[in-house]
Amino acid sequence: MAPRVPDPAELARGVLAGDRTLLARAITLVESSRPDHQRAAQELLLELTPKAGHAVRVGISGVPGVGKSTFIEAMGSTLTSRGHRVAVLAVDPSSTRTRGSILGDKTRMPRLAVDPHAFVRPSPSAGTLGGVARRTRETMVVMEAAGFDVVLVETVGVGQSETAVAGMVDTFLFLTIARTGDALQGIKKGILELADVVAVNKADGPHERDARAAARELAGALHMMTPTSAHWRTPVLSCSAQTGKGLDTVWEKVTAHREALESGGELATRRADQQVEWMWQMVRDRLMDRVLHDPATAERLPKLTAEVRDGGLTPTLAAQQILDVLG
Ligand code: GDP
């Protein structure tokens, strides 16, 4: 017999009262892919959504090794010591529970993991980017309803995950390390276009000068690009997550960016746009899911694929046939 489905109303009360056990259970419900859990999760989210939306949402991206977890540990602890309540979530479609998730892993943020004013949630287990992003967005709603006023969403700067994260936060912080000249070209232009704040990490000891030089060079590169907002120019800073130097300035810029969006009236529009984009993303995901798993279409897919491959059928006709079967 399937285990009992948690009661959404009871979970909602627990979340709103700040009960950490029920909060963890609510997130587990949201992450579950079981259809009955999904239905209960949507009921829960309907109750919690009006109570969410008050947090500062920050995306933090950078390639593995750049210092994201060290940065989040240091920044998160500073913020909780100033009275904030900090949630750390992750979008990492490559992680699996069996391997131990790459991001959000509690052992990577030992201080925050035991901080009563913080909540570190490991990345949901591997899945499609769409699935992982949905769970993270919904977890964000739960965390905000529980009173967390800063949500940090971590992601690796590879693949499309940073675009997904940029689509769910107010401010997107790109972390990098000193690279100059040709190495600078290695930083994808796409990610710089998403960045609202750029920080060159590991600006300490013998690397400090290189980090500052890299920051100047990056600032030059960014100057040529279209700004993320009419009210904002992306600053490039240097910092050390290890010594803490420069972290205050990074946070000041993050909050300044949010204030710029807010006073320009862009924050509300951006968030509303993100909700609508999320709806369309769900439509795309569900349609694809039906195409791939509906028995009627699934049965025809191998033959249609082979015919398109051989040139016996045009891609357009094949697509039409798939959609016709779907009805
Ligand atoms: P992540 O993969 O991006 O999360 O990177 P980590 O936070 O795990 O850091 C990777 C390595 O860089 C670790 O050995 C850290 O101790 C080190 N590291 C992180 N931040 C700094 C920094 O500001 N300065 C120096 N020197 N090392 C750092």
Image (tube, rainbow, N blue to C red):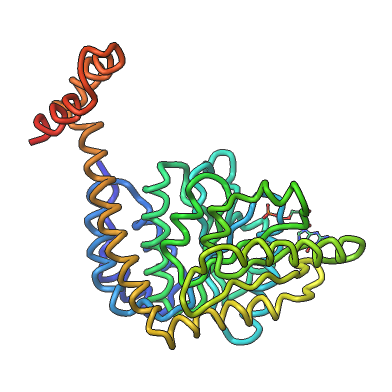
Q: Where is residue 129 in the image (x, y as percent from the top left)?
A: 42, 46
User: Is 51 on the left-hand or right-hand side of 172?
Assistant: left
The residue nearer to you, when weighing 23 against 247, is 247
The residue nearer to you, when weighing 111 against 224, is 224
Residue 240, compared with residue 232, is above or below; it is: above
The residue nearer to you, when weighing 113 against 140, is 140
Q: Tell me which corner region of the image, top left, top right, bottom left or bottom right, holds residue 212.
A: bottom right
Q: Where is residue 165 in the image (x, y as percent from the top left)?
A: 47, 59
Residue ranking furthest to the right: 206
What is the total number of numbered labels drawn onto the structure image? 0
Q: Tell me which corner region of the image, top left, top right, bottom left or bottom right, holds residue 208.
A: bottom right
Residue 145, compared with residue 140, is above or below; it is: below
Residue shown at 27% from the left, 64% from the top:
276
Q: Position of residue 10 (x, y in %)?
A: 28, 71
Residue shown at 41% from the left, 76% from the top:
146
Residue 69, compared with residue 240, is above or below; it is: above
Residue shown at 25% from the left, 73% from the top:
47
> Which quadrant of the render holds ligand 1?
bottom right
Q: Tell me which corner region of the image, top left, top right, bottom left or bottom right, holds residue 196.
A: bottom right
Residue ranking furthest to the front: 224
| Rendered-image quadrant of the C terminus | top left
Q: Where is residue 57 in the image (x, y as percent from the top left)?
A: 48, 72
| Rendered-image quadrant of the N terminus | top left
Residue shown at 56% from the left, 81% from the top:
255
